[in-house]
Amino acid sequence: MKFISARKIVLEKPLSELDQLVLRFVNIVQKYTSYVIISGYVAILLGRSRGTEDVDLFVKKMSFEDFMLFYTDLKNEGFWCLNADDVKEIYSYLVDGLAVRFAINGETIPNFEVKFALKPIQLVTFDDCIEVVTEQGVIIISSLERQIAFKRYYLMSDKDLEDAKHVEEVFKGHIDVEKIKKYKVFLENYNE
Amino acid sequence: MSKLQNSKNDSEARMYFVNYWADFVRTHTDQEWGVQHTKFINSLMHNAKFYPFTAAKYLEMKQEKCSRL
């Protein structure tokens, strides 16, 4: 794994079926809007040895017209929405700040948990996101410091603490500790 | 890198392994850790195909909205 800069990592590992599925999904997403992958899959992509049932991502809000095109594209490429079939209903969940999940047709897991980034705390993840360049394409993830802080000081389950530890250890020497402290203070004072 | 050791309890043992594996990832090439990692993740992907719950049941467990029957 090469840490090229705070905004770019090059990953030369053989991609797993999960990585390939993620690339297949985000390649459709990015035709219509920007996205950032957050949470567990970030640690897994960066080598953490655990499974996951979902890949969480924030996407920038789309108009209903663009969302219709996006949803049609997803369906044509073999995905379905677990929550509903009707495009208006799916879109209404998203504008209400709820997550919707997409998976391979007929399957339940793994799925993509998609949310419109509507709150400032969600939108800022786009400001310092990282490009992970793989042999088969680019995957955009949220910043390592943000990952560590969220998992260690906000989510705080055993799994999250372990994910934070993994990322911190793998990128030892490249992590901006002051940034984590800043996020920690922010999260301690954050009320949803 | 350090050797794997027995730990006092489950969460300590898990965290020890997280450290151990992260250390392995950091000190080896992507090819070296990636082959093992990919094999492991692919086996989990294979198991996912036998997931027994429908989308509706899954979302009910997650307490998320679903209009599918």
Image (cartoon, coloured by chain):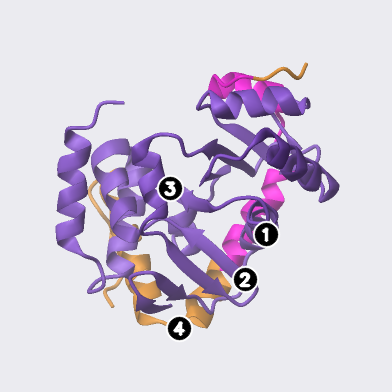
Chain colours: A purple, B orange
Task: Check residue A137 in the rendering and tell me which mark sits there, or answer none.
Answer: 2
| SS at circle 4 | loop
Task: Check residue A27 in the rendering and tell me which mark sits there, or answer none.
Answer: 1
Question: Could you classify mark 4 by the number of other residues whose Cα lies within 10 Å: few (under 14), some (14-19), or many (20 or more)?
Answer: some
Residue occupying image coordinates x 60% and y 50%? A33
Residue B4 seen by the camera: no
Q: Amino acid at mark 3?
A: Ser
Residue occupying image coordinates x 70% and y 58%? A24
Pinpoint residue A162: horizontal percent, then vertical percent: 33, 51
Alpha carbon separation for disc pair 1 and 4 = 27 Å
Alpha carbon separation for disc pair 3 and 4 = 24 Å
Q: Is A109 placed above or below B68 here?
A: below
Is A100 displayed left or right of A171 in the figure?
right
Pinpoint residue B9: horizontal percent, then vertical percent: 26, 45
Pinpoint residue B25: horizontal percent, then vertical percent: 40, 73
Residue span colored magenta = B38-65
Q: Mark 2 — on which chain does it sit?
A: A
Report how many numbered discs are placed on residues in the image.
4
Check whether the beta carbons of the residues at disc 1 and disc 2 lie within 8 A of each other: yes
Q: Earlier in the sequence, mark 1 or mark 2?
A: 1
Q: Is residue A124 magenta?
A: no
Q: Is residue B52 magenta?
A: yes
> What residue is disc 3 on?
A39
Q: Mark 1 — on which chain does it sit?
A: A
